[in-house]
Image (cartoon, rainbow, N blue to C red):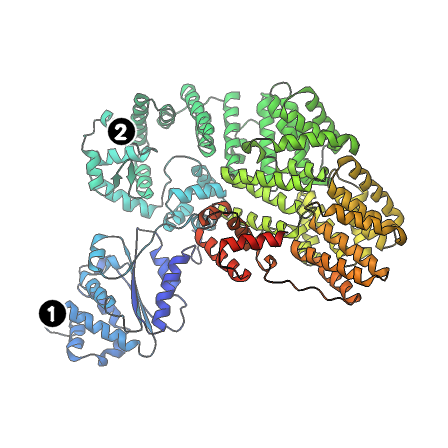
């Protein structure tokens, strides 16, 4: 077993124990009883809270089952390290301790007198250094020692002593420890339990499977560690998607099985039925029990034995009881239980349950049962139960004879597994399919899943060829499944956008031809969208704009369940059309739909695209807010959020160039050419902002001379500025002409504004001013705040050269305000230097501004300002309501306000 270092989660509990220890340091005594089921982490919490504690003298005491019948055995062990303080006790107390410890003869002492002696010893020891007495497995202490320790714990309020106890939640302990504050320890939270399981395994496990197992074990740490010790990551991954009880480790299993067997044979059979069931439906279980000949009162006996709770449904006292019972039964016993449950389901008209239990009761292939299982899987999918669908279809495939039907079911299970993020399971299922299925549709489906897996796992062998492979899948679907063909081609375009210039196996032109062909031969909304992409790739810009606009508008009209999957399309078409406002609105609506659906993987991708998109035609501030939400989403999914990196944003934020470029190289190495190119372009832009024009020219020239679809034209303005300022004005002119032509075709104010700005740069000084003015007036009507700030900056620089210092100062002040507001700090030093050159000082902000807020604080503030409650904000950001409250208090403090109404006014003023 892998050794686990440290403690996962338990932040609130550790804070409570830390406060108790801190009070002891400050002369205030206290006590705490930590209770919980076996393996829940009582010992780990105790050790983590006391190990390494400074300024305290530590005493540790463990209960042992072998000593439970020896009076005062634990007290004897406790007094040994305190023996130097025995002289501080009164004679009676000393005698009581010595007699109780077996080192002196005398009349048996009253346990409370022994307690007074122990209290005196602890008080004496604490004179020099505060004392912490930590008692583990207190339920195994002999009864006399437990009574003494409880007495002491109730009497230490005025001594610098902390008493900590850890015990199972047993009635005898609770009764004897009455009056001592209790901390009932539950399972680990989802994130911590998933992390513990992942850390305990020698190989990675899908976060989705790990999360399912964490839920099934109730977050019990020992169960999770035992599972990691007994099963491989592959075996655990398979369990994570099923409805079967998760097997627990041998220690907990033995504990619970022993309790069940003590309850009698009929109770064992009934509990096994309940364990094999997944519904908790009392009528359902009772019908099965009756068919097995069990008595009517057996369920009451099971409840009396403390194994289950009977309410509206049957509930096990803990999920581990169910697991232990089910896995301790023999295969024949389990199949008998499932046959009884299948019969009950059939009598009650429960179609899905009947199929599932029939399958569990079946050995070998059974095509009829497999068909019923596939029907049940389809019903699960209709309700969004993709994890259930994956599990059910896998079982259906196991019961299906070799052939195309079996292959189709395995592919379907892989598709469902991938939908819930279980990449490893999806891969393993595909490995069980024939290498080249005879059925073309199944072959195409396999290709689609493999490409999705390659993207999900960042496989450098798959990413560059994914677009070509998806076109191959579309060819397999052609003439057989039009919808799948269209979807495969949409995914091929997405892959093309991701890989950028690194795409292999097909050229953008050939991809465009294939997309255009299907858009002409098949109607429907997808055909309209595909026609837009085909035109984007193939047609001259002016001819492509109407088709791209029709596709963009069609996407924005899609229902929520569909638009949330169109992030790449929205970002690509919006950028192609230079429609920054429409792009922002579309991505925001898609993200809202994903949140409402709980589609965290989709939301992750959407916020990533939002972060990247906002760096062209938006603001750095919004890009930072989006990447912060990516981190929150990944934490919610169980992924490590520390490695969430937008290299382009890092360049804007001032990260070292070599670091950003190294990330770009890494992205290119695995096939994410779009990420690499955006990072290089951002470094080039930073060179422009900092006046390193020759470096910017050299960095941006390869990008603009090898243009890529919709992306490169947004880099023309940066290249024009770099070229003009580095002595290459003649080369800049052709890109100015391209921008002007695009602005005439797309009717975009953003595009027209930057085109006018570039025209000013290539014009003679005597002719430049009208273009600067036109650029500013046009960009003021857009959401492209950084581009507007840059227009003011360039105009201000021109005015300074024209010796119009006062006007220059005015323009530069406005530019500085836009850069501060938008988060474009890379332009601030240059702007301030220009202000110094004209003898003007930056205008101080009138009061606290939103730039003082962190990205998370600003996001919370915006949601609060529009009326969301704390729980609502928490749901949106996948954080706790307490965290929301914490952020809002920080926001109010930083902004100098005291109400949400003031917050709305402050944010409105900041956005104006």
Q: Quick check: can you spot residue 455?
A: yes
Left or right relative to 642: residue 85: left
Q: Earlier in the sequence, mark 1 or mark 2?
A: 1
Label 1 with label 2: CB-CB less than 8 Å: no
| Residue position marked by numbered label 1 in the rendering | 108
Residue at 34% x, 66% y is 20
**Picture quarter containing residue 457?**
top right
Q: Residues within 10 Å of mark 2 (few under 14, many from 20)?
A: few
Residue 460 seen from this side: no
Left or right: 636 in relation to 138: right
Report the residue at 37% width, 44% height from top. Answer: 217
Which image quadrant is residue 152 in? bottom left
Above or below 250: residue 443: above
**Nearer to us: label 1 or label 2:** 2
Q: Residue furthest left?
A: 107
Q: Which residue is the site of mark 2?
A: 283
Residue 237 higher or lower than 801, as above or below: above
Relative vertical location of residue 533 with respect to residue 605 in this rendering, above or below: above
Residue 693 is marked as none
Q: Where in the figure is residue 745, as x and y percent of width and height?
A: 78, 35
Nearer to the camera, 817 or 490: 817
Spatial separation of the CA atoms under disc 1 and disc 2: 58 Å
Circle 1 SS class: loop
Expressed as whole percent of the image width and height from the top left, the position of residue 153 reads 25, 66
Element assignment for label 2: helix
Residue 334 spot, x, y in % from top left = 31, 31
Q: Is residue 544 left or right of residue 255?
A: right
Q: Nearer the viewer, residue 119 or 66?
A: 119
User: Horizontal and vertical percent for residue 12?
Assistant: 39, 57
């Amino acid at each position: 077993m892998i050794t686990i270092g440290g403690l996962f989660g338990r932040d609130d509990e550790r804070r409570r124990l830390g406060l108790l220890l801190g009070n002891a340091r400050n002369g205030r005594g206290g006590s705490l009883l930590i209770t919980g089921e076996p393996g829940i982490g009582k010992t780990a919490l105790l050790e983590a809270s006391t190990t390494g504690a400074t300024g305290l003298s530590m005493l540790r005491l463990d209960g042992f089952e072998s000593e439970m019948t020896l009076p005062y055995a634990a007290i004897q062990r406790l007094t040994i390290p305190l023996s130097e303080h025995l002289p501080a006790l009164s004679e009676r107390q000393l005698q009581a301790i010595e007699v109780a410890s077996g080192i002196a003869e005398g009349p048996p002492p009253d346990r409370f007198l022994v307690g007074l002696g122990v209290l005196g010893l602890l008080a004496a020891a604490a004179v020099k250094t505060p004392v912490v007495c930590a008692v583990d497995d207190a339920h195994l202490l002999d009864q006399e020692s437990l009574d003494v320790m409880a007495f002491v714990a109730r009497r230490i309020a005025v001594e610098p002593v902390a008493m900590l106890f850890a015990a199972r939640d047993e009635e005898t302990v609770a009764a004897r420890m009455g009056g001592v504050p209790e901390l009932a320890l539950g399972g680990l939270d989802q994130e911590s339990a998933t992390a513990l399981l992942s850390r305990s395994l020698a190989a990675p496990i899908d976060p989705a499977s790990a999360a399912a197992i964490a839920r099934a074990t109730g977050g019990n740490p020992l169960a999770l560690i035992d599972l990691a010790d007994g099963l491989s990551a592959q075996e655990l991954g398979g369990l994570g998607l099923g409805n079967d009880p998760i097997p627990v480790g041998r220690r907990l299993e033995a504990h619970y099985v022993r309790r069940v067997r003590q309850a009698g044979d009929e109770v064992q059979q009934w509990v096994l039925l309940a364990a094999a069931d997944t519904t908790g439906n009392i009528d359902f279980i009772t019908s099965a029990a009756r068919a097995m000949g069990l008595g009517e009162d057996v369920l009451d006996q099971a409840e009396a034995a403390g194994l289950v709770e009977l309410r509206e449904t049957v509930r096990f006292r803990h999920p581990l009881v169910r697991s232990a019972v089910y896995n301790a039964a023999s295969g024949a016993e389990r199949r008998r239980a499932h046959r009884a449950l299948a019969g009950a389901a059939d009598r009650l008209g429960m179609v899905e349950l009947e199929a599932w239990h029939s399958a569990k009761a079946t050995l070998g292939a059974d095509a009829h049962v497999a068909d019923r299982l596939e029907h049940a899987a389809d019903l699960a999918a209709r309700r969004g139960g993709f994890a259930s669908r994956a599990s059910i279809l896998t079982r259906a495939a196991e019961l299906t004879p070799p052939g195309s039907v079996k292959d189709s079911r395995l592919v379907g299970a892989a598709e469902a597994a991938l939908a819930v993020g279980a990449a490893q399971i999806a891969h393993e299922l595909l490995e069980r399919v024939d290498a080249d299925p005879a059925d073309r549709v199944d072959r195409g489906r396999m290709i689609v899943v493999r490409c999705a897996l390659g993207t999900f796992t960042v496989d450098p062998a798959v990413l560059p060829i994914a677009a070509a492979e998806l076109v191959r899948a579309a060819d397999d679907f052609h003439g057989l499944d039009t919808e799948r063909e269209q979807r495969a081609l949409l995914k091929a375009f997405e892959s093309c956008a991701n890989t950028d210039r690194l795409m292999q196996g097909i050229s953008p032109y050939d991809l465009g031809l294939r997309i255009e062909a299907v858009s002409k031969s098949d109607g429907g909304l997808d055909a309209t969208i595909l026609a837009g992409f085909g035109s984007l790739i193939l047609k001259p810009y002016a001819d492509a704009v109407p088709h791209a606009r029709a596709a963009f508008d069609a996407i924005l009209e899609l229902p929520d369940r569909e638009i949330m999957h169109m992030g790449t399309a929205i970002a690509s078409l919006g950028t192609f059309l230079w429609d920054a406002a429409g792009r922002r609105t579309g991505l925001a609506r898609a993200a809202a739909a994903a949140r409402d659906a709980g589609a965290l993987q989709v939301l992750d991708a959407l916020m990533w695209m939002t972060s990247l998109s906002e760096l062209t035609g938006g603001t750095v501030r919004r890009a930072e807010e989006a990447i912060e939400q990516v981190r929150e989403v990944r934490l919610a999914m169980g992924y490590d959020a520390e490695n969430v990196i937008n290299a382009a944003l890092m360049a804007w934020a001032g990260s070292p160039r070599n670091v950003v470029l190294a990330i770009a190289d890494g992205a290119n190495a695995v096939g994410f050419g779009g990420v690499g190119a955006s990072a290089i372009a951002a470094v080039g832009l930073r060179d422009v902002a900092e006046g390193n024009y020759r470096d910017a020219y050299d960095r941006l020239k390869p990008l603009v001379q090898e243009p890529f679809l919709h992306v490169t034209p947004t880099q023309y303005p940066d290249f024009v500025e770099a070229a003009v300022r580095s002595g290459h004005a003649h080369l800049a002119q052709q890109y100015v002409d391209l921008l002007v032509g695009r602005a005439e075709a797309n009717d975009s104010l953003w595009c027209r504004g930057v085109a006018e700005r570039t025209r000013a740069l290539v014009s003679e000084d005597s002719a430049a001013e009208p273009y600067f003015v036109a650029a500013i007036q046009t960009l003021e009507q857009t959401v492209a705040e950084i581009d507007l700030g840059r227009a003011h900056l360039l105009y201000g620089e021109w005015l300074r050269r024209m010796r119009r210092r006062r006007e220059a100062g005015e323009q530069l002040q406005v530019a500085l305000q836009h850069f501060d507001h938008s988060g474009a700090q890379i332009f601030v030093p240059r702007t301030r230097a220009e202000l110094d050159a004209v003898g003007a000082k930056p205008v101080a902000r009138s009061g606290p501004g939103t730039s003082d807020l962190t990205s998370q604080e600003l996001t919370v503030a915006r949601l609060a300002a529009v009326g969301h409650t704390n729980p609502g904000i928490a749901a949106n950001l996948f954080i706790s309501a307490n965290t929301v409250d914490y952020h809002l208090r920080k926001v109010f403090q930083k902004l100098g306000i005291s109400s949400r109404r003031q917050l709305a006014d402050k944010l409105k003023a900041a956005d104006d």
